[in-house]
Image (cartoon, helix red, strand yellow):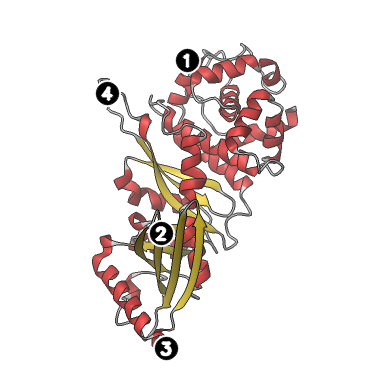
Amino acid sequence: MDAEASRGVSRFFDGLDDPRVVGRCDHLLIDIVMIALVALMGDCDDWVEVEMFGRYHEAWFKRFLKLPHGIPSHDTFERVFARLCPKQMNTCFERWMSHLCQAVTGQSKTITIDGKTLRSSASAKGTSDDQRPLHSVSAYAQEAKLVLAQVVCDDKSNEITAIPQLIEMLELAGCTVTLDAMGCQRAIAQQLHEKKADYVLALKGNHGKLHTQAVLLLAEADDEPGRYQPATHRTDERSRGRHEVRTYTTVKLGVRTSHRIARGHWPGLNAIGRVVSERTEKGKTTVETRYYLISDADADVERFAKAVRGHWGIENGAHWVLDVTFGEDANRTSKDHAPENLAILRRLAMNLFRNHRERTKIALKNQRKIIGWNIDFITELLTQAI
């Protein structure tokens, strides 16, 4: 990496305050952050590995970092990331993602919001600390497969308070936002409506009366299609011995359906959706039916199907990758702010890999290994991202 590319990368970390005592630091903060980021992309998962990676590639790092006292020790990495302000780190992440993904949001794209728990980030049993596992809520761009932003909350039950914070951080005009039942709240629907975004909200027992109304409405639409004019879309998938047929149905809300659904209670609500999944595996067939609130004025059933099916993309495209490829769920980093700051770096690393145009067919796991074998590969990734 040349000096110009280095400056391009480091500008995204402007405003990151150094938590250490001024005048008593041997290493520059930007050097510590950049080594950690590159090492994380280079198949390193803990601070000892980060230090070893830095020492083996010290000559390469000196091409664009000052390194006045060489490579920091693993204890230094641990102490610094434990004390760095996660809010400022998240701001740096958002700034980079805003630059990287400026064409992703605001152009009728689909954004999934969902939570994830870092199970091993809790304090070890028997220690004096009482730190619970870190739980975060992320916004994921389905088409680009990029994490756009994240907000940390105390636990899964507090996602309701974290989701509005996340929505406020994003430019969502023209997007369709999907949320599971935890996010099916009137205040959240109001916020999305005010931001000129469409929504698809999973409707379950937490809104019992409304759920019952939706069930009855779709049942009537099945019996009287001429009156309710339901739109239907069907998909048929076979994979690894599993056969799944999904039937998507949407019914617009209007004069004929006003007796069923109180639209005024849900800002922007324009339709009710239903998905019937019939899965056959090993000779056994199961049927699952789910209902949704839809704000799309056209109630386009194919767009609804894409949004619902794509919602689970965050599990496979982000959560699974972070756990399996980056070892997030097994990582035992637990001191102070270190779990959250490390989680931000992992998402940044994942996005940088996804942004690499020439090698998109190479699995992320193998791309991490390539950097360990040939560190110059990182130059391509970072240059494309600035």
Q: Nearer the viewer, mark 2 or mark 3?
A: 2
Question: Residue reaching furthest front?
Answer: 283
Q: Quadrant of residue 64?
A: top right
**Looking at numbered disc 4 in the image, what kind of residue is underneath it?**
Lys
Q: Quadrant of the N terminus?
A: top right
Residue holding disc 1: 75
Q: From mark 4 to mark 3, how far is it between C-alphas?
A: 62 Å
Does 198 sit above or below residue 131? below
Residue holding disc 4: 125
Q: Are the residues tagged 1 and 2 within 8 Å (C-beta)?
A: no
Q: Nearer the viewer, mark 4 or mark 1?
A: 4
For marks 2 and 3, the one nearer the N-term is 3
For marks 4 and 1, the one nearer the N-term is 1
For marks 3 and 1, the one nearer the N-term is 1
- Residue 345, given in percent of the width and then of the height, sits at 52, 33
Q: From mark 1 to mark 2, how far is it between C-alphas?
A: 53 Å
Q: Are the residues tagged 4 and 3 within 8 Å (C-beta)?
A: no
- Residue 317, given in percent of the width and then of the height, sits at 52, 46
Residue holding disc 2: 280
- Residue 347, given in percent of the width and then of the height, sits at 52, 38
**Residue at the image point whose x is 65% and y is 29% from the top:** 370
Residue holding disc 3: 226
Q: From mark 4 to mark 1, how far is it between C-alphas?
A: 22 Å
Q: Assess disc 1: are there few (<14), some (14-19) or many (≥20) residues with their C-alpha within 10 Å of its C-alpha.
A: few
